[in-house]
Image: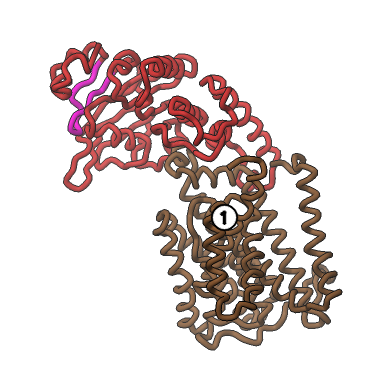
Chain colours: A red, B brown
Amino acid sequence: MTAPILQVKGVTKRYGGLTANNDISFDVAPQEILSVIGPNGAGKSTLFKQIAGFVTPTTGEVIYKGTKISGLPPHKVARMGVVRTFQETTIFKSMTVRENVIVSHHLRSKASLLGFFFGSSQAKADEAEFGKSADDIIDFLGLQAIRNETASNLPQGHLRALGMAIGLATQPEVILLDEPFAGMNHDETMRMVALVRRLRDERGLTVLLVEHDMPAVMKISDRIVCINFGEKIAEGTPAEIQANPRVIEAYLGSEDAAIGM
Amino acid sequence: MAPSRISTPRLLGVLAFLVGVFVLVPAFIALTGRWDFYYTLTSVALLSVAAAGVWLTFYIGRINIGQGAYALTGGYVSAILITQHGISFWLTLPLAGVFCAAVSVLIGLPILRLRGVYFAMVTLVLTEVARLTALALPITNGAKGITSIPLPGELSIFGLTIIPDFATLENPKLAFYLMAAVLMVVTYLVLWRIVNSRLGHLCRSLQQNEELSASIGVNTAMLRVLAYAISSFFGGLAGAIFVAISQSIYPSSFVVQDSVNFMLYCFLGGLGYVFGPMLGTLLLYFGWDLLSVAKEYQLLIYSGALIALMLVLPNGVLSLLDRKGGRK
């Protein structure tokens, strides 16, 4: 395995007496698609929040390219190249699709806020570049038809894609996808699986995702980390995870059919 | 939006507005002899400057019911600098604004972390805190306030008189009106520019979803404080000029009622429109005056009309413009 781009080292998060994450460690290789799975309440979201800087670990740390990022505020983590997307409800609702994507280019602006106020040449250059890049991303995700639609009017599938577009606009190296397949039918899921692959193949991203849809996870992931009751119980390729007795036990009652295919 | 992209009708609209404010209104008053209108219109202009600040805090998704505190602070800063340090009014004007902005940074850093009704409640208390502080501090002269503040003096650069001494003018009312109108125009230009530049887009992203805004790399804490500081700067400016007009200031010059009014001006005009607070101020201020014919029913009719307006036009009076286009 090449040098990891992201390392989670002994991350523990306690809320009072409740331990949401207990001593979780794993590495993520560059351009890998890694899924974090686990039953509801296992602590997947808490883990994601800690990687993206929304929550500071009680102990342990998150290392990105050799630098500790846990404990930094989210905008600094994003600036370094680790960006989290949210579930579909989290977009800028009263902006159009294109405005959503343009505003998300914030990290790349070279002009100062004062420059933007007075309309300096750098600010104009930035705006032009953002517009072009936003159009590229919209084309990449196949959102051309709804470019000027107000986000609050969009159906679920498009919202998910828009959330991804917002994430892409920040030009991340590692993108964290929060349940990208939730609430989708089989066809939509397969399209989304193909899209996530393209994020890696065409844009060179490293993808971390939290997901419940087991068939999709098995299909898309290079490796899987399984969490239960806040602890990592397994890590490995989809085949290894499917065969792991502890994973099967965690999903007890759902048998093989629910975990694999 | 770059200046080159301003459409012709919009430019004409702005020109018509400027002509109206600076030519038609003075001409009308000179013809009819209703000099008292100047005072009313000056008040509207200044209140709309303070309301512009409140509107900006609405724009980042915070309900601000504390602008009166900054108007009072700005007024006292100007009054104290003029009477106790002999500084020219024209210099105290920006100083009052900057002082308020600085205070708002200190206050804003902790309280801007609050959202929704919690932030609103804290700001509501601010005005009362400012009043009590003015009562208690020796420098503000307690309940007696500061009176007999001289009118604004001459403003000259390199011996060239730009603004004459107000005390030597035949008609200081007109001078105050022009000053307030200029300030209002500049304030709304600045506000319009902020909203239509990237800064405004970021503010909107903050209003709609702070978490997402942070995750696309916006320093949300900094942006919130920045918007709040600009808002308070406007409040301080307006307060300082009010003091110059009345030549006095008391702890009760700006009270909670004023803070609530600033918020109402924004609501009535429309939170989605830059010029909303200006229109809202004009309508509410004149509306209240016109209703004085109703005597003891004034407040009843006024508040009834307000409730009705908010029910019928929840997005403010300016949303009527959008309805024509068939949009919601």
Q: For this rendering, which residue is in front, A236 or A141?
A: A141
Specify whether B181 is left or right of A204: right
Left of B321 or right of it: where is A6? left
Compared across the picture, whether A19 is left or right of B89 comes to: left
Left or right placement of residue A91 versus residue A138 in this view: left
Image x and y of residue B6, in percent: 75, 43
* Image quarter of residue A115: top right
Q: Tell me if mark 1 has few (under 14), some (14-19) or many (20+) residues whose alpha carbon lies within 10 angstroms of its own.
A: many
**In the image, what residue occupies the spot 84% across and 65% down?**
B23
Q: Please provide percent x and percent y for residue B32.
A: 83, 76
Image quadrant where one finds the C terminus of chain B? top right
Taking B129 as reference, is A150 above or below it? above
The stretch drawn in magenta includes residue B123: no
Q: Quadrant of the N terminus of chain B?
A: top right
Give the chain of mark 1.
Answer: B
Where disc 1 sits, the SS reads: helix
Name the kind of residue labelled 1 in the image. Leu
Query: Start and end of the magenta stretch?
Result: A224-236
Residue B217: tell me if it is visible: yes
**Numbered disc total:** 1
Q: Is residue B102 above or below residue A49?
A: below
User: Residue A195 appears at what percent x and percent y?
Assistant: 44, 17
Q: State the residue at coordinates (26%, 25%).
A: A37
Give the residue at mark 1. Answer: B56
